[in-house]
Image (cartoon, rainbow, N blue to C red):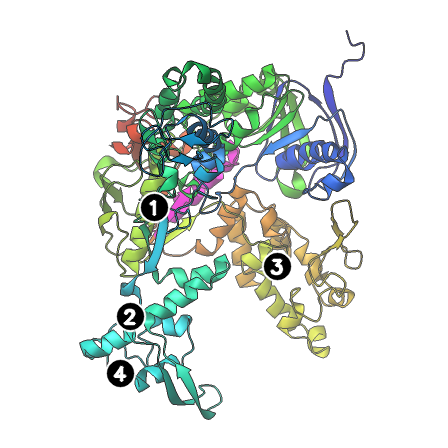
């Protein structure tokens, strides 16, 4: 027995982000919940200190050669961290994966299934005869067809992969083909070709193509609709002939002549598509394309050869179409169908498949099929895939840091998540749980609450102990919500007879994914919340049907293929406010995004000292101006290359992270320079800049959005999902919004109950301004505040995809078929 058994991770002097030199002991082999309002320092402690140090120290134990090939964390700003185990972090918003990523590849179940089909299937000889399963395949022996005598080798697992040798030749393993959508080439036939009627010539090709087209015999000065069929055919399909043209440059009026080859409108798009190398260039081309299911593989992504092997009578592509629930039942039958000498191998492969699949079933993902594209999965589904991957290896002695694992989870799915966390603890691991969901936090063995407020006023530990200790602690903010003593403010709901008095949006769709044909009515000028268990079709109905349909309706474009119709009279724009990060580099800040920095630059340029020095507004830009720091070029940090160790980003020693040169500090307003103002939080800046009307109004909006604690110069990529979501709303507040629909995808992610209260006030403001607000949400407080609820279900996958209930919250409580009803 160990005499000095270590029970706690000891953190001393943590100063990451806004942490105030905190000391804390964190129990090992327990579930430790970290709570607190947005910006209070939860993630700084969990990810910035514990995960960062746990993963860094593990990697330090590896060889230099190995470390060079891995992304490493820099050393956390902390005096000491003792007894921290090797760490794994499951982040709040896992990436969706590329076009080739599916539920099967993401969970790695498809790898095992391919092995199953390679080793255990009936294989087809070159003449079309099928052989019985044989042990020869596993020993890589040549097979001989008993019917025709043909000799061949069975395909390896690699030859059944659509990301490798088993890819369909037509679509390259993507399952889709892109073709030119002719309807987009000439969107407005009332324009002449000279006026830009042929859209791709204006964006993908030189404007000279208009002159070449004229030489091809097409009139370019009459409306496109008045051209003859022959002229239109030349525009769309004309041959690539070289023509001698005279041209005049638009900007310089310089004339010239040259020989130029004619590219018709269709070929212009096809040529641009063939040269696409990145997402940016793809965006320019994709508006002229339509996406269809590959005609050769029917969307399965597999070549004909990869679709030959059969196991229990079905091919690999048909197995991938099954839901996880169905394929688990099917896989269990495989060993019994094998010859005796193959049963041991079959059991081994099947056990490997089931150990992964059962974990996913526990997490409520049984409704997903293996061929479901990753980019169509919701955030919650992707996060649970990530969780299942992390826990399947039955590790011990690992610190798991789970950032918002309740994302996308309906209250009825919480049980499976709690079961997975319990299993991690039973295996001898430790779990750090950063969450706001009181249901999840109440399952913690120990809670650490950060606060009291956010930003500069946060970074302290205001309460810690067992759930019971925190509930009784008067300093705790979360305790009252854990005990049920305090509820999130509830708005007065609109009476049932007035719900539709401002009009309605009517949507009708055909089936898509697992969602059945739907007819949906959404009241205008109200708060509508779309609920339902995971996989019930919320994301598909709102983000893949309603949003693109409203977009195309407002732009008078063709509706998406699966949308039968939409009636949204008076709606001119739809705004999707999601929690994806803002900006991709440190040059994007809170002040630049909220259009405050531009106003400040203009104002400072008008000050006498700035005029005396000849400074213009552009000189106050830290991106390109004369007053930016010459050492870091206005980024506020420099990167140190320390060869075999990870690059270290440190605050610029010249400007101390302010981004500005010393000269910028000499120009002051009320005793403060622009760099000093950029280091203030919103609340402080309001006190200094109250005389500047436009700046004051924009700062007040940020404060109303509950973002008063953010520093103006804070880089936007570092903001949490909830902060990014609210910042995106800044430009939309204080406007009449009767023609606008706002769509929010799980906006309570990362929000403390007190932050949810602020968010509900934001919704109320938007609705009071006439906006229609549609929210996909599981949070019970948001649901209780809805004017109208649309509940999808009854279950996930094939057992869902229908509207179970549509009505007021009061009526929802009495609905027997709704799984949401019993929690509201």
Question: In 3D space, how far apart are the residues under numbered discs 3 and 1 (Cα atoms)?
Answer: 43 Å
Residue situated in front as seen by the camera: 37 or 790 = 790
In the depicted structure, whether residue 551 falls above or below residue 359: below
Q: Identify the mark nearer the N-term, 1 or 4.
A: 4
Label 3, on which residue?
A: 689
Residue situated in front as seen by the camera: 218 or 617 = 218
Q: Position of residue 796 (x, y in %)?
A: 34, 29
Label 1, on which residue?
A: 544
Which of label 3 and label 4 is nearer to you? 4
Q: Secondary structure at mark 2?
A: loop
Label 4, on which residue?
A: 218
Q: Secondary structure at mark 3?
A: helix
Point out the stretch of residues depicted in magenta: 741-770
For disc 4, the neighbor class at 10 Å (few under 14, some 14 to 19, many from 20) is many
Circles 2 and 1, Cβ within 8 Å, touching? The answer is: no
Q: Position of residue 602 (x, y in %)?
A: 60, 70
Q: Identify the mark nearer the N-term, 2 or 3.
A: 2
In the depicted structure, whether residue 286 falls above or below residue 16: below
Residue situated in front as seen by the camera: 90 or 741 = 90
Q: Secondary structure at mark 1?
A: helix
Q: Position of residue 229 (x, y in %)?
A: 19, 76
Q: Identify the mark nearer the N-term, 4 or 2.
A: 2
């Amino acid at each position: 027995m160990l005499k000095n058994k270590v029970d706690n991770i000891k953190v001393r002097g943590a100063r990451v982000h806004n942490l105030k030199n905190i000391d804390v002991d964190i129990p090992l082999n327990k579930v430790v919940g970290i709570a607190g309002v947005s910006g209070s320092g939860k993630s700084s402690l969990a990810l910035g200190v514990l995960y960062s140090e746990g993963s860094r120290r593990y990697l330090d134990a590896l060889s230099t050669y190995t470390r060079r090939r891995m992304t490493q964390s820099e050393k956390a700003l902390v005096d000491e961290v003792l007894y921290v185990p090797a760490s794994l972090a499951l982040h709040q918003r896992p990436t969706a994966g590329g076009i080739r990523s599916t539920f099967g590849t993401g969970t790695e179940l498809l790898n095992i299934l391919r092995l199953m089909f390679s080793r255990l299937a009936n294989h087809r000889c070159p003449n079309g005869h099928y052989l019985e399963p044989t042990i020869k395949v596993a020993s890589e022996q040549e097979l001989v067809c008993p019917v025709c005598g043909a000799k061949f080798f069975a395909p390896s697992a690699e030859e059944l992969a659509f990301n490798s040798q088993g890819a369909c030749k037509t679509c390259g393993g993507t399952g889709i083909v892109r073709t030119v959508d002719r309807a987009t080439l000439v969107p407005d036939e009332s324009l002449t070709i000279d006026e830009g009627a042929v859209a791709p010539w204006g964006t993908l090709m030189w404007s000279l193509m208009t002159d070449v087209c004229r030489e091809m015999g097409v009139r370019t000065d009459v409306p496109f609709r008045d051209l003859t069929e022959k002229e239109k055919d030349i525009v769309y399909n004309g041959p690539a002939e070289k023509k001698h043209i005279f041209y005049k440059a638009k900007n310089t009026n310089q004339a010239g002549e040259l020989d130029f080859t004619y590219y018709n409108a269709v070929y212009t798009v096809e040529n641009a598509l063939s040269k696409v190398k990145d997402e940016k260039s793809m965006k320019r081309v994709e508006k002229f394309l339509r996406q269809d299911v590959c005609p050769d593989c029917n969307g399965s992504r597999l070549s004909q050869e990869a679709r030959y092997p059969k196991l229990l009578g079905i091919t690999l592509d048909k197995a991938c179409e099954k839901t996880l629930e169905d394929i688990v039942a099917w896989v269990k039958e495989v060993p019994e169908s094998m010859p005796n000498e193959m049963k041991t191998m079959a059991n081994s492969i099947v056990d490997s498949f089931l150990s992964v699949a059962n974990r996913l079933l526990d997490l409520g993902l049984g409704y997903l099929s293996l061929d479901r594209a990753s980019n169509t999965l919701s955030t919650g589904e992707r996060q649970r895939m990530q969780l299942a991957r992390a826990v399947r290896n039955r590790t011990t002695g690992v610190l798991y840091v789970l950032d918002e694992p309740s994302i996308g989870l309906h209250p009825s799915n919480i049980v499976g998540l709690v079961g997975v966390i319990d299993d991690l603890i039973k295996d001898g691991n430790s779990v750090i749980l950063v969450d706001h969901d009181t249901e999840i936090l109440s399952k913690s063995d120990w809670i650490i609450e950060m606060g009291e407020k956010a930003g500069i006023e946060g970074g302290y530990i205001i309460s810690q102990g067992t759930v019971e200790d925190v509930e009784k602690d008067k300093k705790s903010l979360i305790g009252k919500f854990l005990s049920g003593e305090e509820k999130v403010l509830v708005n007065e709901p609109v009476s049932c007879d007035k719900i539709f008095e401002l009009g309605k949006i009517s949507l009708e769709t055909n089936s898509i994914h697992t969602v059945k044909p739907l007819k949906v009515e959404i009241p205008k000028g109200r708060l509508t919340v779309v609920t339902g268990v995971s996989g019930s079709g919320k994301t598909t109905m709102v983000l893949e049907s309603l949003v693109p349909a409203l977009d195309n309706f407002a732009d008078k474009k063709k509706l998406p293929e699966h949308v039968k119709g939409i009636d949204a009279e008076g709606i001119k724009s739809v705004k999707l406010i999601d929690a994806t990060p803002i900006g991709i580099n440190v040059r994007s800040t809170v002040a630049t995004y909220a259009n405050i920095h531009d106003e400040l630059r203009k104002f400072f340029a008008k000050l006498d000292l700035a005029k005396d020095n000849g400074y213009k507004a552009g000189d106050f830009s830290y991106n390109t101006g004369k007053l930016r720091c010459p050492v870091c070029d206005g980024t506020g940090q420099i990167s140190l290359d320390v060869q075999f160790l990870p690059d270290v980003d440190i605050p610029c020693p010249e400007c101390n992270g302010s981004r500005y040169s010393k000269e910028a500090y000499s120009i002051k307003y009320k005793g403060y320079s622009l760099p000093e103002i950029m280091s203030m939080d919103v609340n402080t800046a309001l006190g200094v800049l109250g005389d500047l009307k436009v700046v004051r109004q924009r700062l007040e909006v940020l404060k109303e959005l509950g973002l008063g604690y953010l520093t103006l110069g804070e880089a936007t990529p570092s903001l949490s999902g909830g902060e990014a979501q609210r910042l995106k709303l800044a430009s939309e507040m204080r406007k009449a919004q009767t023609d606008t629909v706002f769509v929010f995808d799980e906006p309570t992610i990362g929000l403390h109950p007190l932050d949810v209260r602020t968010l509900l006030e934001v919704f109320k403001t938007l609705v009071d301004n006439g906006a229609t607000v549609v929210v996909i949400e599981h949070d019970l407080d948001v649901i209780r505040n809805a004017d109208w609820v649309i509940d999808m279900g009854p279950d996930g996958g094939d057992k869902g995809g229908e509207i179970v209930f549509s009505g007021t919250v009061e009526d929802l409580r009495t609905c027997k078929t709704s799984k949401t009803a019993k929690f509201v």
